[in-house]
Image (cartoon, rainbow, N blue to C red):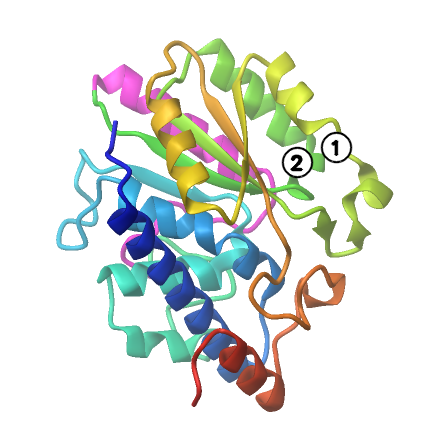
Amino acid sequence: MREITESAIQAVSSKALTLRQDIIRMLGEAGSGHTGGSLSSADIIACLYFWEMNIDPMQPRSAERDRFVLSKGHAAPLLYAALAERGYFPKSELLRLRKLGSPLQGHPDMRKVAGVDASTGSLGQGVSWAVGMALAAKIDGLDFRVYTLLGDGEIEEGLVWEAVMAAHHYKLDNLVAFLDHNRLQIDGPICEVMSPEPVADKFRAFGWETLSVDGHDHRQIMEALNKARTIAGRPTIIIADTVKGKGCSFMENKVEWHGSAPNKEQTSQALAELGCYE
């Protein structure tokens, strides 16, 4: 159990804001990429990388480290921002996102970027990878924990539910999944494309400890992570209700920002709304 203090919450809040600012800068410079889902998940990632996870940028391949798998791999800008802020590589690299020769591709590549534990992008496969990592820890007698982040459109994939079933079968209580439940995917509202609801009931039926939080409330996220540490014999899913494009008024709850990058004027407006005037 990790102590939840006001100073810890404030520190995570500050990091979440920094991540959002860096996401806008990166995507504005690149001119392409996935903005909405990167912004919606920033609070989750801030809690993981700056409060919860046992990781060391100086030892990115330590056998004892906690692992993170970005199952919704298109939110790579968020992962890159967190890794750079955590010290895995210089922040100046962020502005090379999606540029020819840059290691920061549109989806994360573990062969090219320090701190990336899994190469993801094909939806549904990341959570399967996370299940394998958690099972390997059990087999090897190691006590690291595995965290993964899914999109709610992603859980329309059948592969996800095979992994969810396996995680329960193997009693993977060292596995914690987050669901970025912003209710929008590339083709529109999830309820219109292929509704996965009721999400909580489905995970519960598959034998998972099922927690629900406001995905932008750092205290709630931290409390859920602490709760997950007390669960024995089954994995945990934290369903985080979020807002796509969170932090930028003209992007919030707009499906068109799923895979669009801001132009110069939009970048300036977004940064201003995020408290950064450049």
Label 1 packing within 10 angstroms: few (<14), some (14-19), many (20+): some
Location of mark 1 (residue): 196
| Quadrant location, the C terminus | bottom left
In this rendering, would 217 be left or right of 67? right
Tell which residue pokes out farthest to the left in this image. 58
* Disc on the earlier residue, 2 or 1: 2
Question: Do the numbered discs 2 and 1 sit on residues whose CB atoms are within 8 Å?
Answer: yes
Q: Which image quarter: residue 150?
A: top right
Q: Is residue 95 visible?
A: yes
In this rendering, would 118 be left or right of 177? left
Location of mark 2 (residue): 155
Residues shaded magenta = 112-141
Residue sitting at 61 percent across and 16 percent down? Answer: 204
Residue sitting at 60 percent across and 22 percent down? Answer: 162
- Looking at the image, is 139 positioned above or below residue 127? above
| Quadrant location, the N terminus | top left
Instruction: Report x, y in % for residue 31.
Output: 58, 81
Give 5 or 168, whichever is nearer the viewer: 5
